[in-house]
Amino acid sequence: MAQRLLLRRFLASVIPRKPPQGRWAPLTSRALQIAQGPPGGLAAAASRSPVRTIHASRACATTFNVQDGPDFQDRVVNSETPVVVDFHAQWCGPCKILGPRLEKAVAKQHGKVLMAKVDIDDHTDLAIEYEVSAVPTVLAIKNGDVVDKFVGIKDEDQLEAFLKKLIG
């Protein structure tokens, strides 16, 4: 408990409460600096705090959450790259198993295919439009048209075959 209190006090002194006016803080701000030093104390460590580098993974570049109907139209239907659309729900157990498997399979394709994630509770209109009656439902969309579809969980080999068929 005492360690948590010390950590909170230290973080409160390092991280500013208010973000800079008019824009987000740069990636090299004090908020991203991590204290590294001898176990002698927080004050000694705070005086020498090097900046850590943040790296983005390839999965982040190929997987995205759909925000609304126009976003879906722009990023999925109008995409020149084939898109796999994962219709899921937070309460769905099989969705929690399939989602990471599908993201991993899409990431292995190195940008040849994108993955859009659509929460059916947030975007019921899209689920109705694409006739999603059960989750997880995965659609393969190429040039704005649904070219393939499956419902339920698939293993890694089946997912890779599904993606290879989409890519061509």
Image (spheres, rainbow, N blue to C red):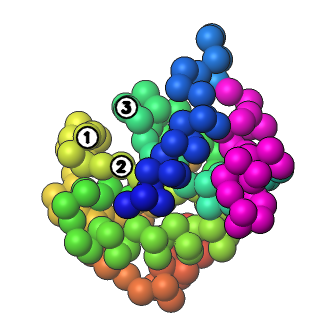
Check disc 2 and report its element: helix, strand or loop: strand
First in residue order: circle 2 vs circle 3: 3
Which residue type does callout 3 highlight?
Gly
* Residue shown at the point (27%, 40%) measured from the top left: 123
Quarter residue 113 falls in:
bottom right
- The 10 Å Cα crowd at callout 1, few under 14, some 14 to 19, many 20 or more, is few
* Residue shown at the point (37%, 73%) measured from the top left: 98
Residue 92 placement (x, y as % from top left): 21, 65
Which residue is identified by label 2? 118
Per the rendering, the mark at residue 29 is none
* Residue shown at the point (51%, 51%) measured from the top left: 6
Residue with the most extreme left position: 133
Q: Quadrant of the N terminus?
A: bottom left
Check disc 1 and report its element: helix, strand or loop: loop
Label 2, label 3: how far apart the Cα atoms are: 10 Å
The answer to whether marks 1 and 2 mark residues whose Cβ atoms lie closer than 8 Å is yes
Per the rendering, the mark at residue 69 is 3
Judge whether residue 23 can be spotted in this image.
Answer: yes
What secondary structure is the stretch in magenta mostly built from?
loop
Which residue type does callout 2 highlight?
Val
Q: Which residues are magenta?
A: 25-49
Q: Nearer the viewer, mark 2 or mark 3?
A: 2
Q: Is residue 158 above or below residue 136?
A: below
**Of 54 and 93, which appears nearest the observer?**
54
Q: Is residue 72 above or below residue 155?
A: above
Per the rendering, the mark at residue 122 is 1
**Of 97 and 79, which appears nearest the observer?**
97
Q: Quadrant of the C terminus?
A: bottom right
